[in-house]
Image (spheres, helix red, strand yellow):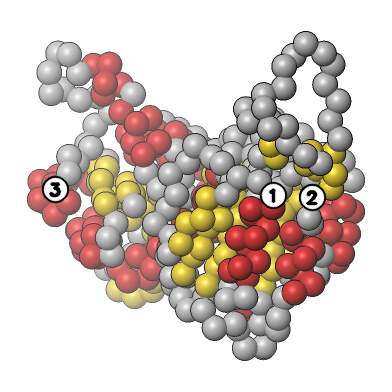
Amino acid sequence: MKIALGVSGGIAAYKAAEIARRLQDRGVHVQVVMTSAAQEFVRPLTFAALTGEKVITEMFSQRDSNSTLDSSVEHIGVAQSIDALLVAPATAATLARFAQGLSEDFLSTLYLATTAPVVVAPAMNVNMWRHPATQANLSTLRSRGVTVVEPGEGYLACGMTGEGRLADTDVIVEALLSRLGQSRELEGEHVLISAGPTYEPIDPVRFLGNRSSGKMGYALAEAALRRGAHVTLVSGPTALTPPAVEEFVPVESSAEMRDALLARFGRASITIMTAAVSDFAPTAAAPQKIKREAALHLDLQPTSDILAELGSRRAPGQLLIGFAAETENLVENARRKLARKHLDAIVLNDVSLPGIGFASERNAGEIITAQEAVSVPEMSKLEMAGRILDVVAKLRAADKTPKVNA
């Protein structure tokens, strides 16, 4: 995992070195980005020695005459390579740039360019912290999904006492890891995940399939691993590299997926069905390639409803989560599916929206349970996986039934 650690100008900048070290202790790769003001308090060499990485200190590199093109788009490269952006300390000026969308230096440009989760840990004078402008900027950032690690109270470097001290290092590190889904709250759980499409053979070279890429299921597997779960991933055909799960089971047809899931369902404490299983399959596959000399008519039969079958077999303590890819009557169809298939939650996706869902790196939707509906704005599929697991963890906490042994 890689994060960018933004360091802005303030006496608390020296604490960013400890934050970098703590993150490295947790296996996180850290690249530091410093504002010009931060360099007045801590030298870039300090962070370079700690992380073993180049410290980015300016928008345009002056390394050589041929670096202009590379350095001019470096913020895009960093933005695309990180799993999160952490800014600690975040000064009032940095928060204002972020809130107003001002790309005045590398750090503020990186904030605008990245789609990864953002965590800020403010540190400033108490009056600056309390000022309506600062509070309005914080409100704007929170509304955009930025996590704010509240400052502590106490004696400040300016000689005043009150809010504004940078939060404790451990608090900041844990807030970041929690945002990234590394809270270990699923430790001891065995999570069974289905992903991808199914291919129903027509003849040796043709099949009935669908547009599922498997990216949402693979993101959920990665997110569950980060939270400490044992993960089994049953996947239809995809072009993806599976994460380092405990067991990876490749399948093709809906029948193969059913057999693989039923064989493993009994030991799963949490099952999440993201796979887009074909609803129909040819009654029989031709043994030889069908020639295109004549019109082709296929006789189709319904495939097994795997999700409903799992819902009817679930034992006390097992959580079952489904997905609903809809194009109309979204909530009504999803709630009916939730009840009909005996699910604890269902993730509703409007697959008619452009730029999200099938084959995309991004997604949006609504996580519906019997008690609530959680709206999820457009975000990366890995971040959405974290939101889904937040709901799963909440369901587990509310379920007093002992969980199935993992």
The 10 Å Cα crowd at callout 2, few under 14, some 14 to 19, many 20 or more, is some
Q: Position of residue 354 (x, y in %)?
A: 69, 30
Q: Earlier in the sequence, mark 1 or mark 3?
A: 3
Q: Which mark is residue 52?
A: 3
* Residue bearing mark 2: 303
Q: Position of residue 176 (x, y in %)?
A: 40, 60
Determine the CA span between mark 2 and mark 3.
54 Å
Q: Is residue 271 visible?
A: no
Labels 2 & 1 near each other (Cβ < 8 A):
yes
Q: Is residue 332 left or right of residue 202?
A: right
Q: Nearer the viewer, mark 1 or mark 3?
A: 1
Amino acid type for the residue under numbered disc 3? Gly
Labels 1 & 3 near each other (Cβ < 8 A):
no
Using the image, determine if residue 59 lies above or below residue 231.
above
The image quarter containing residue 151 is bottom left
Q: Is residue 215 visible?
A: yes
Q: Position of residue 64 (x, y in %)?
A: 12, 18
* Residue bearing mark 1: 254
Determine the CA span between mark 1 and mark 3.
48 Å
Amino acid type for the residue under numbered disc 1? Ser
The image quarter containing residue 55 is top left
Q: Secondary structure at mark 3?
A: loop
Residue at figure coordinates x 25%, y 46% from the top left: 32
* Front residue (pair 159, 105): 105
Q: Secondary structure at mark 1?
A: helix
